[in-house]
Image (cartoon, helix red, strand yellow):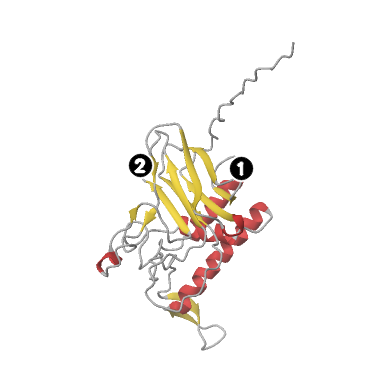
Amino acid sequence: PTDDGRIKPDVVANGENLYSALSGSDSSYGGKTGTSMSSPNASGSAALVAQQYILSFGRAMRSSTLKGLLIHTADDIANPGPDYQTGWGLINAKAAVDVIRDQKANTNKLRIVEGTLDSVTNRSVSHRFLWDGTNPIRVTLAWTDPAGGSLSSTDSRSPRLVNNLDLRLIRADGGTNLPYVMPFVANWSQASMSSNAVTGINNVDNVEQVLLASPTGGGTFQAVVSYQGTLSNNLQAYSLIVSGVSDTPPPPLPVTVDTITPNWVS
């Protein structure tokens, strides 16, 4: 994949025996196979998803939102979770469009968030929601990381991330679920490259995902976005995609009142 173990590819698209125009004549069609089919499949699907967002909200989405949506809604087709063969899975444009339409129809629902972290007031942001009681909870964080420095050597295992954002899911019972990480990272063995993803602190990818396959109980869940170290330019925009969310917003946080004792002057 990459020297530092990032998850690549991000997603895959069907490129096998696609019905396509042929060069024989203006009406010649047939099946074609290869990256010349999968690449336009991926880019065309992404363009349609981006178009749906503009139609729904009257503005363009962030590039990290588009990337996060395609990863969040991809069909897992190989190892459970991400892997180095198919990334996060097979692009499912309809599923991505359905998330956009759901957010449009339920404006109070936590489905798509375009937020910002900074080094002063928003060092950590908690997005609260209720579980819908039926579906798994899946939370995907994506951000466009600032450009890193160039390398002149090979096999450098140092992470290439500039802004190291973190995602965690705090369950209603107070427990915490962490995102996927690849066993190859810190192991660096050939055998570990094909191992199933595990969970933990991810320090290499600019996409992180938490999956809670079987949520239990009621109460408020929290998708918490934070960062380690420092932020380049003291700022980082991010995109968050959430599934398994109830249409009902969570109850408001309790209001705390400070008591002030006046200093009477006699």
Q: Position of residue 132 (x, y in %)?
A: 46, 38
Looking at this view, name the residue that lies furthest to the left: 191
Q: Residue at x 60, y 55 (%)?
A: 234
Looking at this view, name the residue that lies furthest to the front: 266
Q: Is residue 108 above or below residue 186?
A: above
Q: Residue at x 52, y 87 (%)?
A: 23
**Horizontal side of residue 136 vs 233, given as left or right:** left
Please indicate, yes or no, whether residue 112 appears anywhere in the rendered image: yes
Q: Residues within 10 Å of mark 1 (few under 14, many from 20)?
A: few
> For this rendering, which residue is in front, 71 or 190?
190
Q: Residue at x 41, y 67 (%)?
A: 8
Tag shown at residue 214: 2
Q: Position of residue 79 (x, y in %)?
A: 31, 60
Q: Who comes first in sequence, dot 1 or dot 2?
A: 1
Looking at this view, name the residue that lies furthest to the bottom: 24
For the C terminus, the image quarter is top right
> For this rendering, which residue is in front, 202 or 151?
151
Q: Position of residue 230 (x, y in %)?
A: 53, 55
**Horizontal side of residue 220 vs 199, given as left or right:** right
**Residue type indicated by callout 1:** Thr
For the N terminus, the image quarter is bottom left
**Residue type indicated by callout 2:** Ser
Per the image, the residue denoted by label 1 is 107
Snapshot quadrant of residue 14: bottom left
**SS label for mark 2:** loop
Q: Residue at x 41, y 38 (%)?
A: 171
